[in-house]
Image: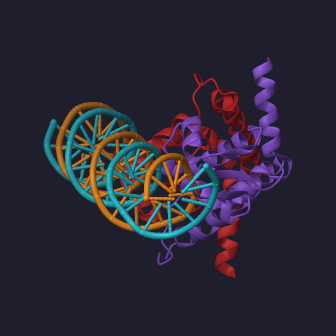
Chain colours: A purple, B red, C orange, D cyan
Amino acid sequence: MNSEFIIAVHSLVLLAHRPDGMASSEEIATNVCTNPVRVRKVMSCLRKNGFVDTREGSGGGYKLSREPGDMTLADVYRALAAGSLAPKWCSGDPESDCLVGSNMGEVMNAVFCGADQQLEQYFESITIGQMLSRLTAMAKA
Amino acid sequence: MNSEFIIAVHSLVLLAHRPDGMASSEEIATNVCTNPVRVRKVMSCLRKNGFVDTREGSGGGYKLSREPGDMTLADVYRALAAGSLAPKWCSGDPESDCLVGSNMGEVMNAVFCGADQQLEQYFESITIGQMLSRLTAMAKA
DNA sequence: TCAACTGTAACTGTTATTATTACAGTAATC
DNA sequence: GATTACTGTAATAATAACAGTTACAGTTGA
């Protein structure tokens, strides 16, 4: 899995956890354990997909633009990791005169499309709000 | 996804397609479009997991040791790609004093375990025999 | 006008992936 | 029993993907 997906989910959960719903790229980066530039890149994408609002300039940062309970991991997945299951490496060669070698690429592709849908469906069942609940439940235990 | 998984599936389908059910690492490599050493490494693993039999020496090669209809992609997945969904890159830091940063790693891990099971279940529904059928259906069309 | 932010691009370092080379071991065939 | 055609495995090299860093232009609040 794309690690940007993880950064995105983590960031959204963090924002959902903040009383004022805001955080800067540096705060998020510290919490996630990466660098601010990477966070900004991911957040920029989340902004374009309507997950967060940005405020540039002094005192700026990121803020959730939807309810945590209304954002599923599937939404995030579609925004920045869709199709990541299929490997870049592709088997077979369409020019091959063997039935198997020439068509395997296409069949394999179909298999991974199905797998991707399956995965997306699973992510559909988990919201950012639920992620936060799991975290608080874990802290109390 | 692990590209060894793809090589394994392709190899098994190719063996299933051969009238005598046999092929050498070089023949497989040509069909898959990779090098024989890589194929041997994957096949070696398939042998250890009971998918194929090996015959060393002149005229040797690999042979299916089970019916194509009895081998699911889930079997192959478990043998050489299980848990590949979760990224190596891990977010958060258990030592953090923030609720989110300190526990996110664990929660994320649980999410990916679930995703992995989901994926495995999907692969359970596809056999090597079916892959071959899809290929022949495609050729006729 | 300054300080504190975001948005990007360019570059560097690190890690993972794939291909290659080499060689020991095994079995069929002459 | 030598030769040929294979597998098994280790070591190395080449390539590609990934993550971190630096730099700087643009925006906004104080």
Q: Position of residue A35 (x, y in %)?
A: 48, 44
Name the quadrant of the C terminus of chain A: top right
How many numbered discs sit on the rendered protein?
Answer: 0
Residue B60 in view: no
Percent x, y of residue A105: 56, 68
Task: Give the camera-side residue of C9 and B138.
Answer: C9
Asked where in the image residue A6 lies, by quadrant, the reply is top right
Residue at position x 86%, y 47% in the image = A69
Question: Where B127 falls versus A137 (above or below)?
Answer: below
Q: Quadrant of residue B118?
A: top right
Residue at x 61% of width, y 39% of height: B82
Q: Please state which of residues D6 and A26 is positioned toward the viewer in this rendering.
A: A26
Q: Residue at x 81, y 52 (%)?
A: A124
Judge whether C26 appears above or below B26 on screen: above
Examine the rendering and report whether any part of residue B138 can be seen: yes
Q: Nearer the viewer, residue B48 or B5?
A: B5
Q: Position of residue B137 (x, y in %)?
A: 70, 74
Q: Nearer the viewer, residue D13 or B11?
A: D13
Residue sitting at 66 percent across and 27 percent down?
A: B98
Q: Is residue A41 left or right of residue C26?
A: right
The residue most toward the top is A141
Give x and y (percent) for residue A136.
79, 27
* Residue D5 lies in quadrant: bottom left
